[in-house]
Image (tube, coloured by chain):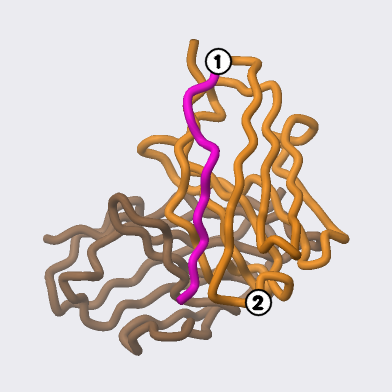
Chain colours: A brown, B orange
Amino acid sequence: EIVMTQSPATLSVSPGERATLSCRASQSVSSNLAWYQQKPGQAPRLLIYGASTRATGIPARFSGSGSGTEFTLTISSLQSEDFAVYYCQQYNNWPPRLTFGGGTKVEIK
Amino acid sequence: QVQLVESGGGLVKPGGSLRLSCAASGFTFSDYYMSWIRQAPGKGLEWVSYISSSSSYTNYADSVKGRFTISRDNAKNSLYLQMNSLRAEDTAVYYCAAGLLGSSLYWGQGTLVTVSS
């Protein structure tokens, strides 16, 4: 099973600052990686798929990068609505055997 | 607009069974693979099961293999999860989700399953 590890667990950032979230896979997942945002009491929302492609309607301040085992989600200038938990998820297997990272909580500094 | 609406959750005793349903609308259901993903209270996301668009392929997390069965009815735009031999550790909000590749684009709001005596 591919294990996804996210760091840090919590990131304290001031509004307007840049946030950088990391996700590491225990083996290569190529570019088969997605990022989701989840706010309290809500379902997750897809932000990024294919490691770097923004989903429809996702603001340009969200960007994804990486391939293989190391991935990054960058939020260029945090807005108040961006404070949430972020999950990475790999989908490299077939049939899919999806695995999520443990999440990074982005909180207001 | 796109909607995924889960139902069938509730309180069940250990060893019991439940059948979750997910009703889809606003998109071509038969084009999408579907997953069940769960979230235990205060915890992260855990993938449970996957079914391809034509039901040709299914897959399960080790934690539920042999106890849960995923199915779909494209004529009814519906997804199902039959859950047997439920355990306390199955307590979670269960989300259905739709995707075209391995990522999940559309999500329901979830249904809570509580396994307790």
The foreground one among A61 and A56 is: A56
Identify the disc placed on residue B28. 2
Relative to A100, A36 lies left or right? left
Q: First in sequence: mark 1 or mark 2?
A: 1
**Residue A28 seen in the figure:** no
Q: Does residue A60 lie above or below A69 as drawn? A: below
Q: Does residue B69 lie above or below B25 as drawn? A: above
Q: Quadrant of residue B60 in the image?
A: top right
User: Residue most toward the bottom?
Assistant: A60
Identify the disc placed on residue B72. none
Label 2 element class: loop
In the rendered image, residue B77, in percent from the top left (x then y), is placed at 67, 63
Q: Residue at x 67, y 64 (%)?
A: A91
Badge 1 amino acid: Lys
Within 10 Å of the Cα at label 2, are there few (<14), some (14-19), or many (20+) other Cα atoms?
few
Within 10 Å of the Cα at label 1, are there few (<14), some (14-19), or many (20+) other Cα atoms?
some
Tell me where the magenta segment starts and ends, as one range. Answer: B1-12
Write down the residue under mark 1: B13
Q: Residue at x 66, y 57 (%)?
A: B78
Q: Does residue B4 lie above or below A82 as drawn? A: above
Q: Quadrant of residue B76 in the image?
A: bottom right
Q: Residue at x 68, y 74 (%)?
A: B101
User: Residue most toward the top?
Assistant: B117
Residue B11 within the magenta-colored segment of the rendering: yes
Q: Residue at x 38, y 61 (%)?
A: A86
